[in-house]
Image (cartoon, helix red, strand yellow):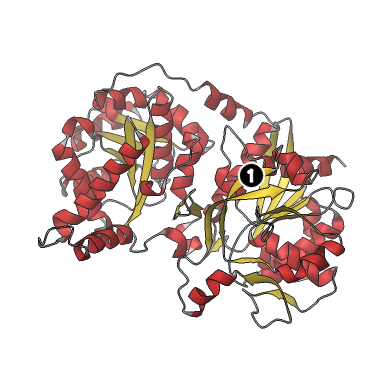
Amino acid sequence: MSGVGKGIASSSIALLLKSRGLKVTALKIDPYINVDAGTMNPTEHGEVFVLENGLETDQDMGNYERFLSTSLPGINYMTTGSVYQDVIRKERNLEYGGKNVEVVPHIPQEVIGRIKRAAENADADVTITEIGGTVGEYQNVLFLEAVRMMKSEMPSQVAVVMVSYLPVPGSIGEMKTKPTQTAVRALNSVGVFADFILARGPVSIDTKRKEKIANFCNVRPEHVIAAPDVQSVYDVPLNYEKDQLSLKICAQLGIKARPSNLAAWKNFVGRSRKGKDTVKIAVVGKYFSSGDFVLSDVYLSVLESIKYSAYALHLTPQITYLSSLDFTDKKALKKLDGYDGILVPGGFGKTGIQGKLNVIEYARKRKIPYFGICYGMQLAVLEYAQNVLKLPRASTEEIDPKAQHLVIGVMPDQKEKIAKGDMGGTMRLGEYPATLRKGSVVARAYGTRTIVERHRHRYEVNPEYIERLTAKGLTFSGTSPDGRLMEIMELPEDVHPFFVGVQFHPEFQARPLSPHPLFTAFVQASYEHKKD
């Protein structure tokens, strides 16, 4: 089933193999016709993660980067759409030499070629490749065919790990293996046979059921690995090592296993358990609801970034998800007094915008530490224009393109594409440098005046209003090197303890072992606010 934890399993295996001194890289295969993840619905697919080169990808690429403490290239992510696009492009360029181009074998061969190129690009000893979706789905048959072909071509160099859920029905009280047996048969039916089975479940699998799965699923009992629910995703690799998973994978691939060094990771997990105090952070967004359920995957990187910084400060974060729609009525704003800090993450569209503006105004006036990311920065500038510059009709071009005062506008070089309705790829994506103002809040947080951060946005602060905003006390403390684009806004510390908005997405570069300095500064300010 989906959401069972394949991404965390892949990330954990990658971390464990890296801890043994191996060079490891990781890929994600998404079975969507979308060429990239940029146009996917966040409440259905989760967060869009942006790589250094600007490619919009699945959130599991973020998990890989965080667990491996590295940045991954665009070649490490593929979708059905991007694979077909490349095969068709090659056919049009006569790169197949006039042959008939067919779904099989050319699509699986393109997949295999991408996996091998990613491995060569990283000079990797081991390449982890996660196939999205579930066994038995039509969408990933061609990717499974690629696995079959690779396993046939180089059997000693390919290991197949299957993640399967073993339920413990409350009315029965016994772990059931039949769903896994059925899933394994579905996998076998396309010619792929698992070497390892990660037995996901609410509790750890016992010896009797390991033997039962081994008997019916053609794997060795010691290759059925316990994967129970744990306190956090960061416990998963440590849990796998109880069954010596990385040692067994090395043996399966014929790699000489080196001693494992997980000391830094264990220290991180230990800090996450031993906070000296708590800090309460409200994340006010609009993508949290899906029917009767609350989703946090939409802002996954933001939430994890808060945690990393809190743990580094020996604090336990208490993060609450609040819908911006609930704050359209200003009477509801009093509930924000119960939080030490407020964060408004990125997003698109006008749903819930008035609620966010009300929250930002409240945080500014009540001097509650505020951190705005992307849209959260744009709306902070807009709120300042409406309430401090006294421009009540100020707006953003995204919400009201005919507004009297477009304080936030579209970038000129994208207007032509948008006019044609070509919204895919019209954003400022990937890494860009910025220069920080000496002595500013953010310059002190970074400890440098030159930074490089990842972007994903279509709109900017309108240069026509910058002078008026700064004259009223707003500081643009970070700009593009040429000074044309406003990257960071803040209020001076003598006016507000921490009121910072950034146009980029710092969460994409936060790591468990190296928290992002802006998140750390925000959490620290929030904790100081709590003590006051």
Q: Residue at the front extreme?
A: 482
Query: Which residue shows up at 67% across the image and 68% down it?
Result: 325
Q: Residue furthest top?
A: 259
Numbered-mark total: 1
> In the image, residue 505 lies at what x, y percent?
60, 52
**In this view, 285 is above or below 450:** below
Residue in the image at 76% along x and 70% along y: 465
User: Which residue has dot 1 on it?
Assistant: 451
Q: Is residue 205 visible in the rendered structure shown here?
A: no
The quadrant of the rendering that contains the C terminus is top right
- Residue 516 shown left or right of residue 436 in the figure: left
Determine the residue positioned at 50% across, 52% down. 50
Q: Nearest the camera: 112 or 523?
A: 112
The answer to whether one can see residue 160 in this image is yes
Residue 431 coordinates in the image, percent (x, y) = 54, 50
Residue 265: image location, x then y, percent: 53, 27
Which element carries disc 1, helix, strand or loop? strand
Q: Quadrant of residue 213?
A: top left
- Would you say 526 lies left or right of 71 here? right
Circle 1 residues within 10 Å: few <14, some 14–19, many ≥20? some
Q: Which residue occupies the extreme right position in the image?
A: 494
Percent across and percent down for residue 41 are 47, 64
The residue closer to the viewer here, 530 or 444, is: 444
Give the residue type that dot 1 points to.
Ile
At a point 38% along the width and 27% down the height, the residue shown is: 17
